[in-house]
Amino acid sequence: MGKESAIEGHPGTTGELTILSVSPLDEDHLSLQAIIGHSKWVLLKARDLVSALALLKEHEVAVVLCERDLVPGTWIDVREHIKSLPNAPALIVSSRLADDRLWAEALNLGAWDVLAKPFDRTEVIRTVHSAWRHWHDQIHMRATAVTMMKAAS
């Protein structure tokens, strides 16, 4: 099997890496689309929690990239909803004020990472790929555990 670069995409269980961008700011969606637009990665866009939840019900999403402040709510509201999903996506928080305090809070509450804005192409690719790898490995570990339990019984 040939080795793919991170930007070419590493397939999830459906054969593609799907990212959900949750932000009330059009510039966030446009910037992310410009960064990953030429790759095999799929970008879904939601302006708020309600539309994000609808997309999460319709698509298998590996990574959610969420603006710190939503209208209404915050990234924490998104985290509360996605953590109960069977294959919960990895969550990356984004903010223009991505300081040590936000980073510590986000990691302590279960986010995968924090990205500063404006987005840096290299950092977005590295962080999304890392989050995808974590998500993929979690699914693989659960599947292996189920297989082992079935074999043992």
Image: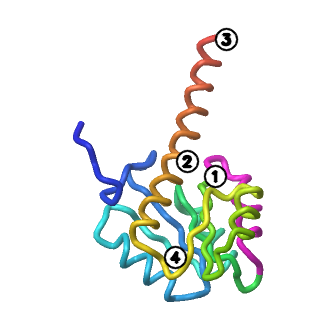
Between label 3 and label 4, give the one nearer the viewer: 4
Looking at the image, which is closer to me, 23 or 150?
23
Disc 1 marks a residue whose amino acid type is Ala
Residue name at image x 43 percent, y 84 percent: 30
Whether the residues at callouts 2 and 1 have beta carbons within 8 Å, the answer is no
Tag count: 4
Q: Which one is earlier in the sequence, the residue at label 3 or at label 1?
A: 1
Q: Secondary structure at mark 4?
A: strand
The stretch in magenta equals 73-87
User: Which residue was labeled with disc 4?
Assistant: 45
Q: Residue furthest front?
A: 100
- Structural distance between the alpha carbons of marks 3 and 1: 28 Å
Residue 33 within the magenta-colored segment of the rendering: no
User: Which residue was labeled with disc 3?
Assistant: 153
Please identify the quadrant where the N terminus is shown: top left
Above or below, 98 against 11 in this view is below
User: Measured from the top left, where is residue 41 in percent x and y?
Assistant: 38, 62
Between label 3 and label 2, give the one nearer the viewer: 2
Above or below, 64 against 152 in this view is below
Whether the residues at callouts 3 and 1 have beta carbons within 8 Å, the answer is no
Disc 2 marks a residue whose amino acid type is Trp
Between label 3 and label 1, give the one nearer the viewer: 1
Residue 54 in view here: yes
Q: Secondary structure at mark 1?
A: loop
Q: Which one is earlier in the sequence, the residue at label 4 or at label 1?
A: 4
Disc 4 marks a residue whose amino acid type is Lys
- Structural distance between the alpha carbons of marks 3 and 2: 28 Å
Q: Which one is earlier in the sequence, the residue at label 2 or at label 4?
A: 4
- Structural distance between the alpha carbons of marks 4 and 1: 17 Å
Q: Which one is earlier in the sequence, the residue at label 2 or at label 1?
A: 1
Which numbered marker is on residue 135? 2
User: Which residue was labeled with disc 1?
Assistant: 88
